[in-house]
Image (cartoon, rainbow, N blue to C red):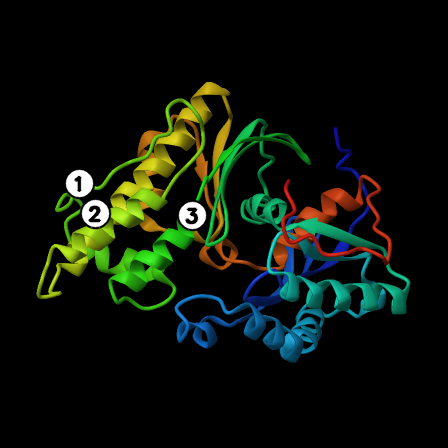
Amino acid sequence: MIDKTEEITRILGIETSCDETAAAVVENGRTIMSNVIASQTDLHAQYGGVFPEVASRKHVEVVYAVVDQALQEAHLSVEDLDCIAVTYGPGLVGSLLVGVNVAKGMAFARTKPLVGINHIEGHIYSLWLTELDEEFEFPIVTLVASGGHTELYLTIDHLRYQHLGGTLDDAAGEAFDKVGRLLGLAYPGGPAIDEISGQGSSKAFRFPRALMDDSYNFSFSGLKTAVLRETKRFEDGQYPVADLAASFQAAAVDMLVMKTVAAAKAYSVKAIHLAGGVSANRRLRHQIEEASTVPVRQPPMVLCTDNAAMIASAAHWRFITGRRDNLDLDVAPSLRL
């Protein structure tokens, strides 16, 4: 059990695991003092997805300005910080290297403790930045769904997790992006599909729901292929985009909701938490609240996508338990929680 009576901590978090360059300062793991995000969405839109080499180069260009802005908005200097935290995995190796090297350099130059954070754990702790006056009860089932991850965790206590299941192929966000590109929608596909689905019928096409028997695993590749096959049935290429988008979204959300709610019941949890970019999906939020018998919490939109506040929050709980990393901290692109 973690002692929560520790002195105030102010931690700088740095996040560069994919295509957002982010820095934030968080106090006591709960209060955001600053949260700066430089998005590369427009840069990668021309490729229909993240171009790794382009992403890492852009991180190099902007990371110092982003860190400086985060400190300025928090009205702090590096000397005022208790710790410097950084995402060291999972993610794109080139992107991770930028953030880790900046954090190591700052920690060395100013003799500050360094804490490496798992990106997935950061998403889990994004919920601790929302309801500041509430102490969450454990256990909690957390669905982390984003462009690179779809994982279901049982959070037993602070820093104690049980992995219940995950995607066996595409992540949910990745499937949204690929279907969005297939339908000619803007990148990223998640928000575009969510928006246009309001103009279509979720019952127009009966797409498969891969329930994977009694496991808590997910599969989206068959669903993605089913959408492709339907588009090819229209020889003139004039297929109903809104109906296809709405029907795809309904199938994807059904799988996420059914697995998450089933896990919540099986483990008698106190709450369900949604995290990651896909947690911004309006249908997912509404449907899981309808299906759940326990409270459902999700972060505000700015904390759904990759950000550094969640990294600093997770680092707080690691820091107060004595976690310190050496300056030989290396990136771990395939890191598991």
Report the side of 129 relative to 287 (left or right).
right
Query: Mark 1 and mark 3: span between their CA atoms?
Result: 20 Å
Earlier along the polypeptide chain: callout 3 or callout 2? 3
x, y percent for residue 184: 26, 67
Pick whichever, 300 or 23, lies toward us: 23
Residue farthest to the right, as pictured:
111
Report the side of 192 relative to 246 (left or right).
right
Query: Mark 3 and mark 2: span between their CA atoms?
Result: 18 Å
Please give the name of the residue rendered at 23% of the width and 51% of the height, measured from the top-left corner: 227
Image vertical order of residue 110 relative to residue 255, above or below:
below
Q: Are marks 3 and 2 in contact (CB under 8 Å)?
A: no
Q: Amino acid at mark 3?
A: Asp
Mark 1 or mark 3: which is in front?
3
The residue labelled by disc 1 is 206
Please give the name of the residue rendered at 32% of the width and 34% of the height, measured from the top-left corner: 210
The residue labelled by disc 2 is 247
Q: Are marks 1 and 2 in contact (CB under 8 Å)?
A: yes
Q: Amino acid at mark 1?
A: Arg
At mark 2, the secondary structure is helix
The residue labelled by disc 3 is 170
Image vertical order of residue 111 relative to residue 225, above or below:
below
